Amino acid sequence: MESKAYNLAHEKNPMITLRVIPGHFTTSNFHISHFLDVSSMKSNATVARNVAHELAMPYLASAQIDTIVCLERTEVIGAYLAEELKESGVTAIGGGDISIITPIANNIGSLSFQSSMVGLLSGRNVLLLTTSISSGRTLDSALDCLAYYRSNIVGISALFLVSSANPELRVNALFTSDDIPGYQFYSSRNCDMCRAGQSLDALISSEGFTKI
C-alpha cells in the first residue's frame, strides 16, 4: 500500500504537496480508493503559510471577513489565512482583527459553539475552512450550525474536494478528485472494489489511517 505512495504538487505552488496512497480504504460510511495525507499542510508552519496564501486569493476583493471557522484541525492554516487577508486589506467589522474559532462536535456529528463564541458568529461574515469535502455530510452539518447562529457565509475553503460533492456550492479547494487519476468514492454498501474482491487496507479518519 504505502510503497505505491506519491506526492502531488499544487499547480501554482510546488511548496504545497499532497501525499497520495492508492488502496482500498474505509470510513464509517464510505469506501475510498486513495488515502490523502494532508498532515504537513496542517502542521508544518512553512507549508501552512503557503497553503494560506493560496486559499486567500479568492477573498482578496472581499470587503470584510469577521471570523474563520476551522474544522478538522485547520487552526494553524486559519491563523495564517487571517494574516494573509489582513495584509491584503480584508478586515473585520469596524476594522478589527479576524477571529479564528473551532466548533464542538457531539457523538452524532452535530456541531455547536461555546456561548462565549456566539458573538463572533451572529450576523458576522464567516469563512469556513476544512480539510476535505467528500460526501458533504460534515459540510452540511457545519452550514446548518452556522445558519442556526445566523452567520453570513462568505466563502468555503478546503484542502481537498471530491468534485461531485455539493455541486451547488462554490468551494475554493487546493486539490480536487479530478487531480488524482482513478480516484473513486463509494457508499460502503455499493463498492466496486469490494465486488471485485479487493481487501480493505485501512480505516481512515481525520487523524490518519489504521491498517486492517
Image (cartoon, rainbow, N blue to C red):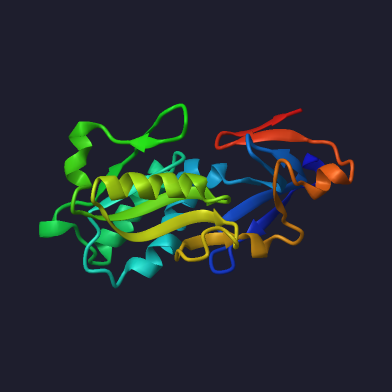
Q: Residue at x 53, y 52 (%)?
A: 133
Above or below residue 106? Residue 132 is below
Where in the figure is residue 88, as x and y percent of width and height?
A: 27, 66
| Quadrant of res 74 | top left
Q: Is residue 115 left or right of residue 159?
A: left
Q: Among all residues in the image, which is located at the extreme right?
A: 197
Please name whichever residue, 52 or 146, is drawn nearer the observer in this view of the structure: 146
Which quadrant is the C terminus positioned in?
top right
Q: Is residue 11 left or right of residue 31?
A: left
Q: Residue at x 60, y 61 (%)?
A: 164
| Quadrant of res 199 | top right
| Quadrant of res 183 | bottom right
Please name whichever residue, 50 or 156, is drawn nearer the observer in this view of the structure: 156
Which quadrant is the N terminus positioned in?
top right
Q: Residue at x 22, y 38 (%)?
A: 117
Where in the figure is residue 140, as x and y percent of width and height?
A: 44, 49
Q: Residue at x 52, y 51 (%)?
A: 136
Q: Among all residues in the image, which is located at the extreme bottom?
A: 61
Where in the figure is residue 170, as x and y percent of width and height?
A: 45, 66
Above or below residue 63? Residue 204 is above
Please name whichever residue, 206 or 42, is drawn nearer the observer in this view of the structure: 206
Q: Is residue 175 left or right of residue 151?
A: right
Above or below residue 138? Residue 171 is below
Q: Among all residues in the image, which is located at the extreme left?
A: 94
Q: Among all residues in the image, which is located at the extreme front?
A: 189
Number of dots carrying numbers: 0
Where in the figure is residue 173, as x and y percent of width and height?
A: 50, 61
